[in-house]
Image (spheres, rainbow, N blue to C red):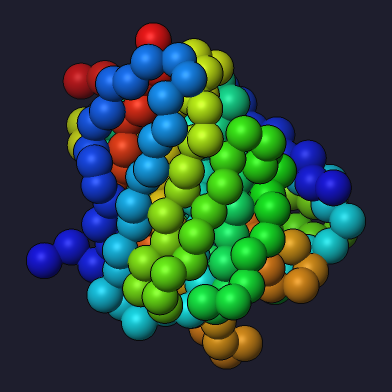
């Protein structure tokens, strides 16, 4: 099975940098995804890591360490619109399904 | 036009009623999924399908059934709804290519309330 842990809530200030951590224990692994979800809306894809290291995409970066079962999402130059829930999800070894963490609610204040 | 659509967007029903939620997609993806989302529990997989003749149970399939009528359509049924099934339901689609992310694309969600 899969077990995915991420903090429930985080707060940060506009313009700052925030790091959202995700740890996982899985029976198989074929990639880790980060999704953003605004309240009442659908999740939208942010990033994907399958190899160790950092993937950068504008203000957002995601890091993966497979040996440690650890990932983080780094958000730079925070904006008010970044207030949302951030979901970490692991794909199983057979490329079949995603298992999602419970999500981290990020509140960005002025 | 939206690539993944869900109907209805909101539904209030009573305990014991049969309910069908529908999902359609124009992305041409083979894979379709149904999730439910509850506060504090995250997204949990109910059923998934990789083509028209393929149905697979997810983590929480009890009390639900699905039908894949065509590549573009995947419906979720609650045979006898109970209040515990009050939740936000999402449909998602993906293709599968070993050289791409094959990320899932989500519909707008259906908010279901069972009284």
Question: With respect to residue B100, does B3 lie above or below?
Answer: above
Measuring from the top left, give residue B69's x and y in whole percent: 42, 69
- Name the residue nearer the viewer: A15 or B14: B14
* Residue A88 seen anywhere in this rendered image of the structure: no
Furthest residue toward top: B115
Question: With respect to residue B80, does B71 lie above or below?
Answer: below
Measuring from the top left, give residue A103's x and y in whole percent: 53, 33
Residue at the image position 57 percent from the left and 67 percent from the top: B49
- Name the residue nearer the viewer: B27 or A17: B27
Residue at the image position 84 percent from the left and 62 percent from the top: A28
Q: Quadrant of residue A94?
A: bottom right
Q: Quadrant of residue B63?
A: top right
- Please state, as top left, top right, bottom left or bottom right, where the C terminus of chain A lies in the image: top left
Specify whether B52 is left or right of B63. left
Specify whether B109 is left or right of A56. left
- Name the residue nearer the viewer: B10 or A95: B10
Measuring from the top left, give residue A60's x and y in whole percent: 40, 55
Measuring from the top left, give residue B4's x and y in whole percent: 28, 62
- Name the residue nearer the viewer: A84 or B71: B71
* Residue A28 seen anywhere in this rendered image of the structure: yes
């Amino acid at each position: 099975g899969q077990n995915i842990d991420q903090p429930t809530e985080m707060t940060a200030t506009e313009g700052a940098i925030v790091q959202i951590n995700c740890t996982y224990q899985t029976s198989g692994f074929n990639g880790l995804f980060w999704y953003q979800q605004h309240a009442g809306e659908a999740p939208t894809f942010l990033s994907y890591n399958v190899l160790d290291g950092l993937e950068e995409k504008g203000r957002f970066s995601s890091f993966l360490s497979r040996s440690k079962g650890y990932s983080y999402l780094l958000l730079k130059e925070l904006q008010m619109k970044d207030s949302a829930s951030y979901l970490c999800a692991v794909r199983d070894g057979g490329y079949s399904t995603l298992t999602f963490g419970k999500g981290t609610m990020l509140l960005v204040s002025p | 036009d939206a690539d993944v659509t869900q109907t209805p967007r909101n539904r209030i029903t009573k305990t014991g009623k049969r309910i069908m939620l529908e999902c359609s997609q124009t992305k041409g993806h083979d894979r379709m999924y149904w999730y439910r989302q509850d506060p504090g529990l995250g997204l949990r997989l109910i059923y998934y399908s990789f083509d028209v003749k393929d149905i697979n149970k997810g983590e929480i399939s009890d009390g639900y059934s699905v039908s894949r009528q065509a590549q573009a359509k995947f419906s979720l049924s609650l045979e006898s709804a109970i209040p515990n099934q009050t939740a936000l339901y999402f449909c998602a689609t993906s293709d599968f290519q070993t050289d791409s992310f094959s990320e899932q694309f989500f519909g707008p969600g259906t908010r279901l309330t069972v009284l």
